Amino acid sequence: MKTSEVVQAWGKILRGQQPSLSIEITKECPLKCPGCYAYDDGHLGGGTTLRSLTDRKGQELIDGVLETVDRLKPLHLSLVGGDPLVRYREVETMVPLLLARGIHVQVVTSAFRKIASEWADMEHLSVVVSIDGLQPDHDIRRAPATYDRILKNIEGQHITIHSTITGQMMKQPGYLEKFLQFWTPRPEIRKVWFSLFTPQIGDSMPEILTREERLRAMQELLDLRVRYPKVDMAKGLIEQFATPPHTPDDCVFARTTQVLTADFKTKVTPCQYGGKPDCEQCGCIASMGLAAVAAHKLWGVVPVGMIFRGSVAVGETWRKLAGGDEEQVPEPAFKVLQ
Ligand code: SF4
Ligand code: SF4
């Protein structure tokens, strides 16, 4: 992230706004992944579920995304689902319009269908493809977005792989390295990110890593990032897996990212997982990345997290003074920061 972008993000926090926005643009997905949080009954807090919402299609969807972005003015936008490429025509139309607004756009997909060739080298656009493990495991979990299909659909692209490490994977020695040996030599792969499976409070399932598996995954990643430069995870980020936030209030990522679901109104809280995520077992790469930034000490003395918490408090006060409406917050005197 460039210094100017950090300053811009900080300015938004001071105004009581969230610099990142994620929109579940469709409730539809051709996959049925075990452990999928989007379709969990508790994802939207109980009562409403993603499947019961009315989502948009066609021009109505494009207009909805653009209107939301123009209103909330995020610096970074993630288009997620379901699978956003279920609405590929709309997404292909809206991406250039979003980039023209000067924001970074990330499309998170299973690559069950071909990725638009024009996206291969678009500046400020990231295509993130979820690949969960080696072919035999992935193909069972994520059919019809199988390895063969992904390989065809990413031809000519420069994508980021995002892989969620599960307890089952950590029970097989050398698993993560075999995964990197398969994917990193391919020219279509620009970066590889790993998260750890994040359960909801009270969950008991084989995907959950034991404490020992979690620490071992961390050690392996610290080693692999050196030997496989496409692993785009800083040492400080990986080390945060040992001490995830205790609660959503402690999570910089949750406090700086607004997540809207497919009706463009319902907020997914406290973070993209929705429901009651078990923060103490969180393995979200984005949460760990921002926790690493918060742990950094300016001039070796002042933790960035302390400044962040102060800035959030200022922003919340400013928003209350503005009547609590996040869209009507006036420009404060510290606009000069930007
Ligand atoms: S691709 Fe994503 S939204 Fe679709 S079932 Fe899998 S985890 Fe859920
Ligand atoms: S991203 Fe992780 S730490 Fe942050 S609120 Fe969600 S589960 Fe908790």
Image: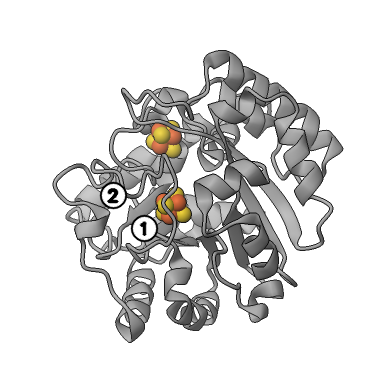
Judge from the rendering whether residue 27 lies leftward or rightward of residue 5; answer left or right: left
The answer to whether residue 14 is above or below residue 51 is above
Q: Nearer the viewer, residue 232 or 207?
A: 207
Mark 2 residue element: helix
**Earlier along the polypeptide chain: callout 1 or callout 2?**
2
Q: Which residue is mark 1?
A: 332
Q: Nearer the viewer, residue 227 or 202?
A: 202
Q: Residue at x 59, y 27 (%)?
A: 240
* Residue 279, quarter of the rendered image: top left
Judge from the rendering whether residue 156 lies leftward or rightward of residue 84; answer left or right: right
Q: Nearer the viewer, residue 234 or 179?
A: 179
Provide residue 21's location: percent of width, then percent of height.
41, 58
What is the three-letter code of the residue carrying label 1? Pro
Q: Residue at x 44, y 66 (%)?
A: 84
Q: Which mark is residue 318?
A: 2
Provide residue 11's location: percent of width, then percent of height.
46, 54
What is the three-letter code of the residue carrying label 2? Trp
Q: Residue at x 53, y 64 (%)?
A: 107
The answer to whether residue 319 is above or below residue 298 is below
Provide residue 246's location: percent of width, then percent of height.
40, 23
Q: Disc 1, disc 2: CB below 8 Å?
A: yes
* Residue 327, quarter of the rendered image: bottom left
Is residue 15 among the parts visible in the rendering?
no
How far separated are the C-alphas under marks 1 and 2? 8 Å
